Amino acid sequence: MISPSHEAVTPGGSPKEAAAAGSGSPLEVPAAVEPLTAEQLATEWDEERPPHAGVLANVAAAVAAAALGAAGLAMSLAMGLGTPEKPEPGMWPFLVSLVMVVMSVALLLFGRKKLDAEAFSSSSWLVVAGVGTLVGFVTVVGIAGFEIPSLLLTFVWLRFLGKETWRMSILLSFIVTAAFYVIFVVALSVPIPHLF
């Protein structure tokens, strides 16, 4: 016979009844968490985000990107563009640089007062480190082939810039490098420097 203090809670019982039946009850219902409203979420996100960049930073970013795009246009023209049917090495860099210049001019004209850009902070150095390692990759790939530099670049980006675990960084570095090899060397026969 079951004593009154250990009565079973029926499935239709209230949460209070379930809680009264004991903390080990499988039918115990945890207290409901109130969902945040859209305004509360927006306020929380605004408190957590870095400060806004401001007009001067937006203008500086647009000018820097435009200068980089203009340099890319000049170097692309020096390599030769060719035709759409027979493109030369400068065709794709030219198109990318042209888009960069157009977007930079649009940012300079219309985006100066936008507040979605973040101010430079200590985390901005991660971008500098990413660009620096990419430049190192481009410098070395012609000498050592793309496999080892790709492996190292992916590992550095995942482990030190992306804060992934050691195991995940090593595993994904091998997977990404192998995927690039299969796609570009084996499947597409792209003439890039490689060891194997």
Image (cartoon, rainbow, N blue to C red):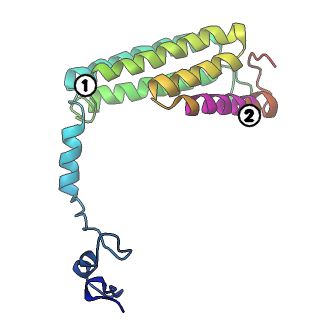
Residue 43 as seen in the image, left or right of residue 93:
left
Q: Amino acid at mark 1?
A: Ala
Q: Residue at x 80, y 34 (%)?
A: 187
The quadrant in which residue 75 appears is top right
Q: Amino acid at mark 2?
A: Ile
Residue at which label 1 appears: 119
The quadrant in which residue 108 appears is top left
Residue at which label 2 appears: 183
The single residue placed furthest to the bottom in the displayed view is 1
Mark 2–mark 1 Cα distance, whole angstroms, equals 38 Å
Residue 43 as seen in the image, left or right of residue 63:
left
Q: Nearer the viewer, residue 70 or 42?
A: 42
Magenta region includes residue 172:
yes
Q: Residue at x 70, y 20 (%)?
A: 147
Q: Is residue 186 above or below residue 24?
A: above
In the rendering, at what x and y percent does residue 118 appear? 27, 29
In the rendering, at what x and y percent does residue 10 appear? 34, 88
Residue 69 seen by the camera: no
Q: Secondary structure at mark 2?
A: helix
For disc 1, the neighbor class at 10 Å (few under 14, some 14 to 19, many from 20) is some
Picture disc at residue 132:
none
In the rendering, at what x and y percent does residue 85 appear? 73, 30
Q: Secondary structure at mark 1?
A: loop
Q: Residue at x 24, y 34 (%)?
A: 114
Which circle's residue, 2 or 1, is located before the other in the chain?
Answer: 1
Q: Nearer the viewer, residue 42 or 78?
A: 42
The boundaries of the magenta stretch are 168-181
In the rendering, at what x and y percent does residue 72 appear? 51, 15
